[in-house]
Amino acid sequence: MDQQVSKTKKHTFDFFKRAARESQEQDAAEARRRTMGVYSGVLASFLLGWAPILGKMAYHAGVASLTLASIRTVVAALFLFVAYLLFWRKLLAVRIPDLLNCFLVGMINGVGSIFYYSALERLDASRASLLSALYAVWVVIFLAASGQPVTRLTLGRLTASLVGAFLVTSPWVTTNSSDFLGIMLMAASAAINGWYMVMGQWVLADVPARSATLYILTGMALTVSIARVASGVPLEPIALPGWTAIVALGLTTALSRMAMFFSMERLGGVQTVILGFMEMAVSLALAMILLGDRLTWIQWLGAVLLVGGGFFARRDLEQGAAPPQSFNPMDV
C-alpha cells in the first residue's frame, strides 16, 4: 500500500515537473519569437530610413518621381522572386483569396508610394521624413474606427501630432507653391500607408509574413508600373548614379518589407509602428549628414510634438489594439 502511494506521489511530481518544464520552454520560445520581432522591426526601420535619401540621390541624377517609384518596386519584387525560388519555394504557394488580398493591399501601398515619391521630389528629405510619420497617427485612427476605444488623452496626443506636423511644415515661411503641393501629397501618402499597415496586419492573420511580403510587393509593382505606362511620358535617360540609387532603393525596399512583415507577424501592427519611429531618426541623421538638410528650432519643436504625440497615442491602444483575426475588412 505504501509503495503504491509512493509511486502515485512520484508520478504526480513527475507530471508537474514536466508541465513546469514545458511551460518554461514555451515561455522561452515566445520570448525568442518576440525578440526576433524586435530585431526585425529595428532592421526594417534602418533600411526604410534610407528611402528619402536614396530618392533624393536619384532625383539629383535626373530621375523622374514616377520612374523612380515604378522601377524601384519592380527591382524589389524581382529580387524577392529570385530569393524565394532559391530558398523559400514552398512559400510561393498561397490560396487564391489570400493572393487577391495581398494584391489589393499592394495596390493600396502602390498608390501611397506614388504620392510619397511625388511629394519627396518637392520637399527636402528631412521634412518629407517627418511628415511621412503621420501614417502612424492614421494607424491609430483606423484601429479606433475598427472598434478600439479612444480616450480624451489619446485624442489630445493625436492633436499634438497634428500641431507638430503644422510646425514642421512652417507654412508661414513657405513661398513656393510646389512645397504646398508636396505637403498635401505627403499627407495623402501618410493616410494611405496608415491604412496599408492596418490592412497588412489583417492579411497576416491567414498568410505567412514572407508570402504576404512577396505578393504585396508584386501588387505594388503592377500598380506603379501601370501608372508609369499610363502617364504616356517616354522613359528619360538615366545615368549610372541614377541606376545605382534606384537599385539600392529597390533592394532596401525588398529587405525592409521582409523585416517589417516578419516583425508584424510576431509583435502585431501597433508595436511594429512604434519601432518604425527609428526610421525617422535614421532619415533625419542621414539627411543632415549626406544632404546638408537643416531644421529651424520651431521645426524641431514640431518634430518632438509629431513624434511624441503619435508614439504615446499608439501606446494608449497597444493593449488589445489588433482587431479579432476573424475580421477582415476586405471580406466586407
Image: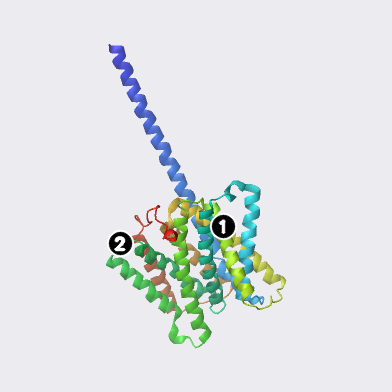
Q: Position of residue 46 (x, y in %)?
A: 53, 61
Q: Position of residue 225 (x, y in %)?
A: 62, 69
Judge by depth and name the residue closer to the eye, 173 or 100. 100
**Residue type pointed to by label 2:** Pro
In the depicted structure, whether residue 248 falls above or below residue 327: below
Residue drawn at (43%, 86%) of the image? 172
Question: Mark 2 Cα within 10 Å, few/some/many (few <14, many 20+)?
Answer: few
Image quadrant containing the C terminus: bottom left
Residue 255 visible within the image: yes
Residue drawn at (59%, 72%) of the image? 227
How does the figure colour the protein chain or chains?
Answer: rainbow
**Residue type pointed to by label 1:** Tyr
Numbered circle sitting on residue 149: 2
Numbered circle sitting on residue 215: 1
* Residue most extreme to the top: 1
- The first of marks 1 and 2 along the sequence is 2
Rounded to the nearest angstrom, the CA distance separating label 1 from label 2 is 32 Å
Residue drawn at (57%, 77%) of the image? 121
